[in-house]
Amino acid sequence: MLYKEYEPEVLKKLQRAEVEILKDFDALCQKHNIDYFVCGGTAIGGVRHQGFIPWDDDIDLGMTREHYEHFLEVAEQEYGERYKIMNADTNPDFPVTLTKWYRTGFRNEEMIDLGLHIGIAIDIFCFDNVADELPKFRRQAMRAWTWGKLMVLRQVGEPNIYVEGWKAKLTLLVAKLAHWGLKALHFS
């Protein structure tokens, strides 16, 4: 399975909650002159589907470093207990290279399995010094992708994989070995 499958009514309810979070996020950003843009699946959904990709369950947003740092400064102050920030800086066990701005009072089962209590969230990506030349951009993107996967493998011994059959077994074996190797390096 490539994506988590939801009952249609559950997915629609989740997407509506995401939009409500986005409205609060947008109000915060407008109040503090913070620029952001849609990216990833949210950008694809907006162009191709005029909304969410039919099976998508999150919203992806991007910011430049300056606006990202400003957002981090004001976000929790503005919304107190209603929203929280989770990233690798706020919690070293957080396994990905993005920030989640999440609504409290909800549960994300995948994150609970990792010992992280995160509710419904929008994903915020910091775009930092992106290269203008295509070859440099590709190298930069590959390094970011590699480090991102290593962060996930450090925390997740059996990640979701997108292959089947013998390739799935081999991929899971390599993932488990990498997981335990990274765990050993992290605690030594």
Image: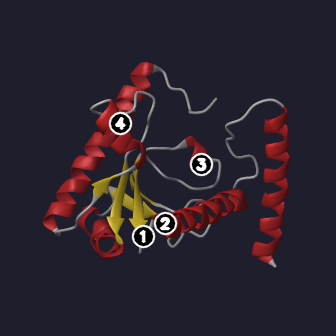
Which mark, residue 56?
none
Q: How far apart in space, not on screen, are marks 2 and 4 (Cα)?
A: 24 Å
Q: Is residue 116 above or below residue 51?
A: below
Amino acid type at mark 2: Phe
Which structural element holds mark 3?
helix
Amino acid type at mark 3: Ile
Foreground residue among 152 and 42: 42
Q: Are the residues at dot 2 and dot 1 in contact (C-beta closer than 8 Å)?
A: yes
Tell me if mark 1 has few (under 14), some (14-19) or many (20+) residues whose alpha carbon lies within 10 angstroms of its own.
Answer: few
Amino acid type at mark 4: Gly
Q: Where does label 2 land, which residue?
A: 137
Which residue occupies 39% across, 61% down? Answer: 84
The residue furthest bottom is: 188
Q: Where does label 1 land, which residue?
A: 130
Q: How far apart in space, not on screen, are marks 4 and 3 (Cα)?
A: 27 Å
Q: How far apart in space, not on screen, are marks 4 and 1 (Cα)?
A: 23 Å
Amino acid type at mark 1: Val
Tell me if mark 2 has few (under 14), some (14-19) or many (20+) residues whose alpha carbon lies within 10 angstroms of its own.
Answer: some
The answer to whether any part of residue 50 appears in the image is yes
Q: Where does label 4 land, which residue?
A: 45
Which residue occupies 34% across, 44% down? Answer: 43
Which structural element holds mark 2?
helix
Which residue occupies 14% across, 65% down? Answer: 31
Query: In which quarter of the view is residue 35 placed?
Result: bottom left
**Pair 1/3: label in front:** 1
Q: Are the residues at dot 4 and dot 3 in contact (C-beta closer than 8 Å)?
A: no
Q: Are the residues at dot 2 and dot 4 in contact (C-beta closer than 8 Å)?
A: no
Query: In which quarter of the view is residue 143 placed?
Result: bottom right
Q: Where does label 3 land, which residue?
A: 112
Residue 139 lies, in percent from the top left, at: 57, 67
Sequence-wise first label, 1 or 3 = 3
